[in-house]
Amino acid sequence: MSKKKEITVLTERVTVQKLHEADYISLTDIARYREPGRTEHVIQNWMRNRNTIEFLGIWETLNNPGFKHLEFEVFRKQAGLNSFVLTPTQWIGNTEAIGIVSRRGRYGGTFAHKDIAFEFASWISVEFKLYLIKEFQRLKEQELEQLGWDIKRNLARINYRIHTDAIRENLIPPELEARQVTLVYASEADVLNMALFGRTAKAWREANPGTKKGNIRDEANAAQLVCLANLENLNALFIRDGLPQSERLGKLNRIAIEQMRLLLGDACGRWEAERGVKWPLETIRPNNCADNYRGGGK
């Protein structure tokens, strides 16, 4: 099982975790909303219901090739009888069900696939079900947002590997000490920082001592990260062509300006249209179009 996450539904903290490549929600936490001290009893009462048995059987038929239908029929025929009792462990053990998972111990409990968990929540309380769906959707949106950021950062990391390989092959003489190698890498990273951000990493840290993020690139927006990835590839090519650092910096700065103009085209276009002039390439910083347009820059 993967790392658990929690959402707050009305007064209850409900655990969500990945299992079988899907989201499973704690039925134990949901049951606590009805009877805090008798969660197992609440789950068993729900499972002995004929409608519940039908629902679970159909879900397993759709999602579980190994589901034992004969054993399911035995439970289905007994459902509704006063003497009928069904626990999650009995259901799982007899039918090879995958929609419900039961664990014992301090951090155990009964979990169910989100489809089943929503059905259980509806039996507990319609209000609780609606809030559960709302909070679950909020969690998924947060995960997607984080995934988008991770993809952008990984893109920059992949291109940085190409970039550092080129430095190692073309800039580093033999027998350099580790300290010297680090200085070469740092200087090349600052070539890109100067081209895109107009300052070195050290200068940025000194100007932003209170920031939680210690890296200028962690503060970059999506457009700047895309531009940075392109600059890293281009710098690797320039290094292989034997261009000196000063020449590469000039080229990269001009390319950064043009690319950021394209990526932030609407803001730059409005600024130029209002003033009737082209933004001068020799003075533009890649994020100035948007910043100056918002702030009414001269």
Image (spheres, grey):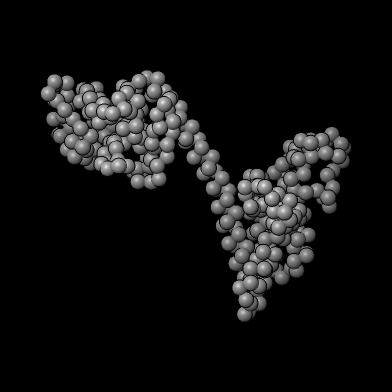
x and y, in percent, of residue 285 in the image: 78, 49
Residue that appears at 20% across and 32% down? 87
Above or below, 152 relative to 125: below
Residue placed most toward the observer, 255 or 42: 42
Q: Is residue 158 left or right of residue 208?
A: left
- Could you say which quadrant of the image residue 73 lies in? top left
Residue at image position (28%, 28%) is: 37
- State whether residue 212 appears in this view: yes
Judging depth in this view, the residue of 221 and 227 nearest the camera is 221
Quadrant in which the C terminus appears: top right
Farthest-out residue, bottom = 175
Q: Is residue 174 left or right of residue 25?
A: right
**Residue 288 coordinates in the image, percent (x, y):** 77, 44
Which residue is at 57% across, 50% downward? 153
The image position of residue 98, as x and y in percent, is: 27, 39
Q: Is residue 268 visible?
A: no
Q: Position of residue 45 (x, y in %)?
A: 22, 25
> Is residue 130 shown left or right of residue 164?
left
Residue nearer the viewer, 45 or 104: 104
Residues 70 and 292: in front is: 292
The image quarter in which residue 291 lies = top right
- Residue drawn at the location 65% of the way across and 47% of the way down: 211
